[in-house]
C-alpha cells in the first residue's frame, strides 16, 4: 500500500529471458514491490525462455510461497501444438491457480475453459500487436476478459487502444509505458473500470506507480487503476 492506495501490478516478469539474458527472481521482485508499495503482482514468463514448463514452475513456486503477493500467468508458444498447449495451460491452472494467458487463435477457448483472462502485447510488432486486432475475439467471446498490455505501446497506437476499449467492454487497457498526459487522454474516453497499471520490468515499478498517484483525478478513479480493475479481472472465483 502507498499513500492509502492498494496497488496491483498487472504486468511483471519472473525467470530468465532467452532473448536478452535478463534474470528476475521472486525475492528481488518482492523487495522492489515492498519499496514502492505494490501489494500484488501478476507474474508472467518472459516472451522467450529455454523451457516454458520450467518458467511456469518457477512462477508457480513463487505463487505457492507468496500467495498473497503473486498470481501467475502462463506464456508459451502456440506452435507447440494445440493439444500440448491445452495440457500445459490446464496444468498451470490446476497446480498453481494461474490467472492469465497470452493470445493466439485457439487460446480464446482455452482461456475460457480455464477461467483465465488474456494478456496481449500491443505496440511493437504491428500488425499482430494492433489493439484493434483483438476486437473480433472480444466481440465473439464477450465472457472473456482481454487485457491490452502497454495500451498500444508508449502512445504510438493510443487511439487504436481507446477505440478497442470503447467498442468492447471486455477489453481492458494496461497503462505501462504511457506518459501521464496519455493516461489522462485515455481517461477522457474510457472508464477507469477498464484501466489498470503494470510495470513490465522491475526498474519501471516506481515510475508506473507514481504517475498514477500524481494524476489530478478523483480518488475512486485512482483506486480503479491501482487495484480495483485488476482485482475484478484476475481474482475471479475459479
Image: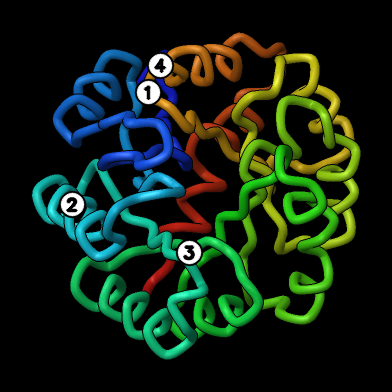
Dot 2 corresponds to which residue? 58
Dot 3 corresponds to which residue? 101
Callout 4 touching callout 3 (CB < 8 Å): no
- The local crowd at label 4, few if under 14, some if 14 to 19, many if 20 or more residues have their Cα within 10 Å, is few
Question: How far apart, in angstroms, are the residues tagged by discs 1 and 2?
Answer: 17 Å
Among numbered discs 3 and 1, the one appearing first in the sequence: 3
Dot 4 corresponds to which residue? 203
Among numbered discs 2 and 3, the one appearing first in the sequence: 2
Which of these two is toward me, 57 or 52? 52
Q: In which quarter of the image is the N terminus?
A: top left
Asked if 81 appears above or below 67 in the picture, the reply is below
Question: How far apart, in angstroms, are the residues tagged by discs 4 and 1?
Answer: 4 Å
Callout 2 touching callout 3 (CB < 8 Å): no
Give coordinates of residue 141: x percent, y percent: 71, 80
Asked if 3 appears above or below 135 in the picture, the reply is above
Callout 3 touching callout 1 (CB < 8 Å): no
Which of these two is toward me, 88 or 119? 88
Q: Quadrant of the C terminus?
A: bottom left
Question: How far apart, in angstroms, are the residues tagged by discs 4 and 2?
Answer: 21 Å
Callout 4 touching callout 1 (CB < 8 Å): yes
Give coordinates of residue 147: x percent, y percent: 62, 53
Which of these two is toward me, 163 or 13? 13
* Secondary structure state at the residue bearing disc 3: strand
Among numbered discs 1 and 2, the one appearing first in the sequence: 2
Dot 1 corresponds to which residue? 202
Is residue 120 shown left or right of residue 59? right
Amino acid at each position: 500500500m502507498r499513500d492509502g492506495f492498494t496497488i496491483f501490478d498487472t504486468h511483471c516478469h519472473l525467470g530468465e529471458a532467452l532473448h536478452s539474458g535478463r534474470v528476475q527472481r521472486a525475492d528481488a521482485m518482492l523487495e522492489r514491490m515492498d519499496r514502492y508499495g505494490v501489494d500484488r503482482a501478476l507474474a508472467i514468463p518472459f516472451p522467450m525462455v529455454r523451457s516454458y514448463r520450467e518458467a511456469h514452475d518457477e512462477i508457480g513456486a513463487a505463487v505457492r510461497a507468496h500467495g498473497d503477493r503473486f498470481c501467475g500467468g502462463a506464456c508459451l508458444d502456440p506452435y507447440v501444438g494445440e493439444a500440448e498447449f491445452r495440457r500445459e495451460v490446464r496444468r498451470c491452472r490446476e497446480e498453481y491457480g494461474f490467472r492469465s494467458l497470452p493470445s493466439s487463435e485457439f487460446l480464446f477457448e482455452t482461456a475460457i475453459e480455464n477461467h483465465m483472462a488474456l494478456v496481449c502485447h500491443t505496440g511493437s510488432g504491428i500488425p499482430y500487436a494492433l489493439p484493434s486486432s483483438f476486437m473480433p475475439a472480444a466481440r465473439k467471446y464477450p465472457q472473456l476478459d482481454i487485457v491490452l498490455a502497454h495500451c498500444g505501446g508508449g502512445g504510438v497506437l493510443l487511439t487504436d487502444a481507446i477505440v478497442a476499449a470503447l467498442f468492447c467492454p471486455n477489453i481492458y487497457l494496461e497503462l505501462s509505458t504511457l506518459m501521464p498526459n496519455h493516461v489522462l487522454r485515455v481517461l477522457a474516453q474510457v472508464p477507469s473500470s477498464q484501466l489498470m497499471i503494470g510495470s513490465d520490468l522491475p526498474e519501471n515499478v516506481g515510475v508506473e506507480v507514481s504517475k498514477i498517484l500524481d494524476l489530478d483525478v478523483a480518488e475512486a478513479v485512482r483506486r480503479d487503476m491501482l487495484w480495483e480493475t485488476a482485482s475484478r479481472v484476475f481474482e475471479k472465483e475459479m
